[in-house]
Image (cartoon, coloured by chain):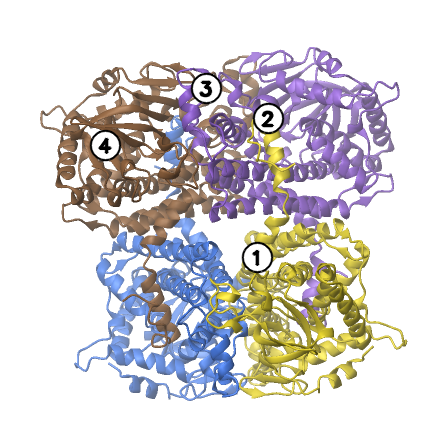
Chain colours: A brown, B blue, C yellow, D purple
Amino acid sequence: MMTGADYLASLADGRVVYFEGRRVDVTTEPGFVEACQWIAGTYDRFFDPAPDATNPVFHIPRTAIELRERVEMLVNSDITMSLSAVAFALLTAAPAMASVDPVFGERIARYYAECVRRDVRFAEVITDAKGDRSLGPSKQADPDSYLRVVGRDADGIVIRGAKFHITAGPLAHELIVMPTKRMKAGEEDYAVCCAVPANARGVIQIAASHHPRSDDTRSHPISARTAHPDAMVIFDDVHVPWDRVFLDGAVEQSAAVAHALGLWERLSGCAHLAEVGDLLAGLAQLIAEANGTDRIAHVRDKITDITLYATMVRACFEAALANAVLRPDGMLVPDELYTNAGKYAAANDYAVMVRHLHDIAGGTVVTAPTMADYDNTDLRPFIDKYLVGRSGVSGEYRMRLFHAIRDLTADSWGGREAVSWLQSGGGLYAQRSVLRGHYDIDRAKRLALDVAGLTDLAPAATVRS
Amino acid sequence: MMTGADYLASLADGRVVYFEGRRVDVTTEPGFVEACQWIAGTYDRFFDPAPDATNPVFHIPRTAIELRERVEMLVNSDITMSLSAVAFALLTAAPAMASVDPVFGERIARYYAECVRRDVRFAEVITDAKGDRSLGPSKQADPDSYLRVVGRDADGIVIRGAKFHITAGPLAHELIVMPTKRMKAGEEDYAVCCAVPANARGVIQIAASHHPRSDDTRSHPISARTAHPDAMVIFDDVHVPWDRVFLDGAVEQSAAVAHALGLWERLSGCAHLAEVGDLLAGLAQLIAEANGTDRIAHVRDKITDITLYATMVRACFEAALANAVLRPDGMLVPDELYTNAGKYAAANDYAVMVRHLHDIAGGTVVTAPTMADYDNTDLRPFIDKYLVGRSGVSGEYRMRLFHAIRDLTADSWGGREAVSWLQSGGGLYAQRSVLRGHYDIDRAKRLALDVAGLTDLAPAATVRS
Amino acid sequence: MMTGADYLASLADGRVVYFEGRRVDVTTEPGFVEACQWIAGTYDRFFDPAPDATNPVFHIPRTAIELRERVEMLVNSDITMSLSAVAFALLTAAPAMASVDPVFGERIARYYAECVRRDVRFAEVITDAKGDRSLGPSKQADPDSYLRVVGRDADGIVIRGAKFHITAGPLAHELIVMPTKRMKAGEEDYAVCCAVPANARGVIQIAASHHPRSDDTRSHPISARTAHPDAMVIFDDVHVPWDRVFLDGAVEQSAAVAHALGLWERLSGCAHLAEVGDLLAGLAQLIAEANGTDRIAHVRDKITDITLYATMVRACFEAALANAVLRPDGMLVPDELYTNAGKYAAANDYAVMVRHLHDIAGGTVVTAPTMADYDNTDLRPFIDKYLVGRSGVSGEYRMRLFHAIRDLTADSWGGREAVSWLQSGGGLYAQRSVLRGHYDIDRAKRLALDVAGLTDLAPAATVRS
Amino acid sequence: MMTGADYLASLADGRVVYFEGRRVDVTTEPGFVEACQWIAGTYDRFFDPAPDATNPVFHIPRTAIELRERVEMLVNSDITMSLSAVAFALLTAAPAMASVDPVFGERIARYYAECVRRDVRFAEVITDAKGDRSLGPSKQADPDSYLRVVGRDADGIVIRGAKFHITAGPLAHELIVMPTKRMKAGEEDYAVCCAVPANARGVIQIAASHHPRSDDTRSHPISARTAHPDAMVIFDDVHVPWDRVFLDGAVEQSAAVAHALGLWERLSGCAHLAEVGDLLAGLAQLIAEANGTDRIAHVRDKITDITLYATMVRACFEAALANAVLRPDGMLVPDELYTNAGKYAAANDYAVMVRHLHDIAGGTVVTAPTMADYDNTDLRPFIDKYLVGRSGVSGEYRMRLFHAIRDLTADSWGGREAVSWLQSGGGLYAQRSVLRGHYDIDRAKRLALDVAGLTDLAPAATVRS
């Protein structure tokens, strides 16, 4: 297992990462270094010096209790959850890949074991450039609009394309590349799934970051610790050896990994957003109490809305676990219907919960003096005097609470989070479609026919038995 | 145990029931007889001739599986669920009553055992007349606006007042009377809980019914079977012997039964509305297919909304069961937070789901010809010709599907159901208040302080440990 | 001009109307007679004995003030608005029809003048049977699924088909038949618009009614006066003389009347629902005051939601009038964008406003004793005693207020209204589509490009100048 | 009249402004200079060299057309609208102030005339520090929690306190100080309205700014031009001469200016948000077209939602103008009911419209490469290749469109805007309360009684005639 220090050292591997037009060293670049440290911290937290020890992020849950523990462990480790979900997705999809050719299943097993041994982290490399979204991969003006195999030889394949929204890509060791959707006949070159080291020749990452910049980081108490870069990753004719190729050309199974990843992404999103819901409820209650408005009916009502949100999302997570299915290979897979319902509802209503928080907190969310103002001894007495709230609530506490709310919900990182919660796991519409696909509409139709007394009169094709 | 026939016979006990100004015999009055038959049917369904057999509606669940089975059994028996929930509530509240005086606990236990032996059904008698709702019971112009004890003697107590919205009251054997809310000091006479036979002297029921009337009942395929009367029950100085008095004067415990009843009511409401959600989804899908509109995007989208509704409500039910708590006395009590969240969300969004169904089905919901029109041989060919839908969908089937939708959602029974789902278990606001009371806001505040890095700066009183 | 008595006499014209399988006389059949009387009352209200007098329902508005007066006059006359809107639609569409052949314009003008002279009322005959809604008129298994011309001769045309949801059809003199949508090449026989007397040979109406039936009508204080029948109208090879044919075969103009009708329907719907919004707000406030709950925060909040609803809908009506356009032929046409926005928003949110009213009023909406109970001298004292509300609020007043609420929103007529508001003017989706068609998206795109500083970089085809 | 250059010169008046702990010169400080230039630009735009010319921002509208022109002119001038609204509010409230003492009315008239002559700009100085919001001004632990008069002498008054959320305060010439709400008996010292020069001794501004900082401003195409600072303004015993005091001690009229300001603020907010709605619709349509997703049903549906939002808000603005009232003093005052409804609805639904835009645009909103990346010749070919969209849409155009969306809605300025739209004009709850106060609930009650047939039976106190 790696320690945090080992992890930081491992990033000096020659990887090519650009940020705002400059090539950067991720371990020293402001805005990346904090995220590196955060991940290093989770390495240290889970470190076990025993020679055979393996990182618990790789332990496969076999009971609802283990699954819950795993998810709860990772909700608190944030980025690390993202950086391991794809490995689970690969395992979840392995039977589907093996059905094409047993060698794919064997390669996944070997690769997974080796990664566990090396204790590395993974990026989910899924969303293609896509070009004109009204056309499929093979109909694009530029055939590289979806990542594809442009060459094959005895040693492996060569891939070309670009992938978007790669969470923490610059901080991962392994890039798990997969098709963004199910491919069709004639699109065999796009049906490729493989693993690429982050420092492979031809891999170029262009990073976006939402960490605090010229400001005093004390005004960004949350993002200063947790913001991490996302990247657009370019695969400029990257060679991938065969033992890292897990699918090549089988269009029928091309969506298997993306599908499995979606499930684990949405489960963690559901668990995470339940926690975020609690966080928003807590912030709303704290600022209402600090303002002395927590007894006002409409304020209480809006806080109740947030608690209802958090509770409904958590209920879906609980239901997904209570109805999880144990697969023949020993992996416990959460219920897809509840997982998707929870993630969708959470993403869909997040914007309104943030609005409730802003409504309760008031305009000072965006107009509070900063910690630098507070450092100025001419201004501090005024801030102490005029920022106080209810009896016992100091100006400094209240001011810093406003900064936390702004940082989380009304500034760069807040904007990034709002968009990410919507889009993670595939966007609202994709989440609805998956939900619909897993809902037993035939049972609902039979129930309706029975209640209406029309079972015998229904057209033959109405309900599949 | 009673058979259905035994049940019907048992109703001829001299009870005083009025309907539209006339005193009626519930076993023969149109609109009551169908409900009596329905209940009789559930007696027959559960009947076991073994001498020691007891009705499964009285079996106390001790595991999540038993609790789920009980609820699922009763969702399909509808009225019978209502007619037994209050007995469970009495048992759930028994420890609270016994804490006032052990004799209350003993009376409840004896009464429950005797009722199990007799296999009787119960009405929940809770909502008071209330007069001016801005004033408490003891402040009303008429002290009888809340039911109260107006006399006590060696044999028992005398009660006076009126209770509203008594579901299936005219069809129950036992009326379980309880305070509608927690009473305050000085309101001891209102803190009364007792059991009254439906035929006790001084008990007068004024029933409302939403069953089909002058119409052909074939146009009301659902309500013709399931509509049941609700009643306003007047207690005109009714004498109740001591062994049927379970609380008298202890204001602190006066809400215990109502609270317990609320929990079981909302759990059954949650389970029931998950099923109703599936029913609405099924009807929407059936009529969309019959119309040939099931592939249209906005129709699919609205059906997905209904499936999401049903799934979220069911998730709360699942979470309530997965987090149920086994009490020392062996009763498994569902989680209050998830139960209330599910019932609230279901009641709150029901109106919109019905609107989706109406939107998908189209105006024929309220303008379809009737079965009497279809019987007319001059009209039948036109109905056969012009009511057909997609290939294979007959005019008769489609017409009857419209009638089922109208009957369930856009006619007398539909109106009664819409109001009842809102109000059952105490109205939207009460459900929100209970939800809020069970949400762990202190944990949320601690989480928020931790994320904001303000744990040390927070005012001392902010968070209870 | 006709008096009310003239109107009632005019209905004895041999028309063929069925209700619940029986052929009925609309002037004596319960459920129709009240609606006849209502319409007769509006005749009397507008009657002017001057020989040249014409009914103000036919006066063409030429200013915003006249348009407002006309709409306000008709909102209070309810059915009469429906019974004259289609005449306006015919006039509005006349230029489009005349563009096909001037004779059509001339026939409309003559027909309109003659109808004004006769002072008759019109039914809008638009929605076809439609069969499989995923197929167009000419692709249906039965070519009569959309009404069509099946014969032409020197005297006129012969039409066959069925039309649905014909509001007050049994009470109108003239049926204005028009295509339900724009027809395509090859569908010339479906592109027919004409006027048919209600008593023409081959016209058969099957009526649905939502008036009170076996109940005491005092329990239905609103529907007893205002409920009117809707009909399915069958055209069983009906001959229509040429001077009543306003379009025949011109598919490009086939939607002109339906389009014009939609505008007037939605304008009146918008105005009407603003008034219904006020009515719901008034009922909610009255029952809250009667209950003594009007000071409770959540009750006030819900009433405010209803007032907001009424105000937003009325704002759209005001904006439609303020931006109305005077056509060259002197007719003032309301703004389509605001008209559609108002009707859509009103229809979309109606269900939630009704839920607010039910939530505020409480369960007694569906469980109140009836006036027949109140007539019973044994029961009346109990109703007087236990139905009272806040000081000064009698039991009888409060009970009757509950009946009004139930009748309007939670009973047969309430169900009919809920569905009708959704579907009138073409259903929610159609209203959205029209809204979208009238919104100036090109202006919005130019604004966005300007704000983003991208006007010069935008692809050439992005914005039409 | 002043030119832009005059305006910039006028700011060098010794004013005390702090930003991030440093005292700054607003005409040179990054983040302030752009806003200064923007305002200077509006001076130049309206400049007229005629000696008697006055700035059109001061012209008092006397017809609906003038009012519309004024609002439309100012929507496009943005900050200038804020910087003149309070002058209008002062005029609107002048009769109320004069009713206390004619001298107040005369001072306002003289002050206004002088300001028009000087062509200065105003800040609205209204929101107090407030301390414990559950207590009134006179009950606070610190009596300065609301601004108050702490001294009076022959020359004038001395005021002390702090005011929050002062839009563009550092860029205004005159601070119009007014009570944040209606004061009560005993709070006379808080009932003060006066005008203070921005450079008066004792005035200290602590500014917050949301302009782009270390980033390339090309990544912030909107905020780089339009972001302006907000300030907390401290009045540290500031002396105000009598001719600048417009109210002192009259608690009954203490809310008059705030009330008038609220109306003009909400009218401009309503007009502005209608424009913002169009902007969001335009951006959504542009990015959907660029992505090739504009024909997808759910994308179209969400864009239609945004157009509906923009249309409903604009309808309220139109209705407020169409129902404006001309006051005896010649000022045209918009209708309060429609104004508040529009502002409330716009603020309430803004968050959901932004979510729609994010949902349509996709994750690239927050992960797009920057212009600095595009400047790098190693990266530019990849951006050109992989950021392209539908045929004809260049990578650069699409990338910059994402930056515009992020800057407006998902970054610092976007967060500031989201909070500001909610809170401007007083927060959602205040807007609802004002709406409720202006709605004619008595008319609604009379309508309901009439429809229910209960006019004669209603309690006497029910409806004010």
- Provide the chain ID for the residue under circle 2: C
Callout in the foreground (2, 3): 2
Crowding near pointer 3: few (<14 within 10 Å), some, many (20+)? Answer: many
Residue for badge 3: D374
The three-letter code of the residue at mark 1 reads Ala
Q: Do circles 4 and 3 both sit on a common chain?
A: no
Quarter of the view holding residue B98: bottom left
Residue B352 is situated, as x and y percent measured from the top left of the image, at: 49, 58
**Mark 3: which secondary structure?**
helix
Q: Do circles 2 and 3 both sit on a common chain?
A: no
Q: Residue at x 66, y 50 (%)?
A: C337
Q: Residue at x 28, y 69 (%)?
A: B73
Closer to the camera, A56 or D169?
A56
Closer to the camera, B395 or D365?
B395
Residue B37 located left or right of residue A397: left
Residue for badge 4: A194
Residue C319 located left or right of residue B289: right
Pick the quarter of the image with the N terminus of chain A: top left
**Mark 1: which secondary structure?**
helix
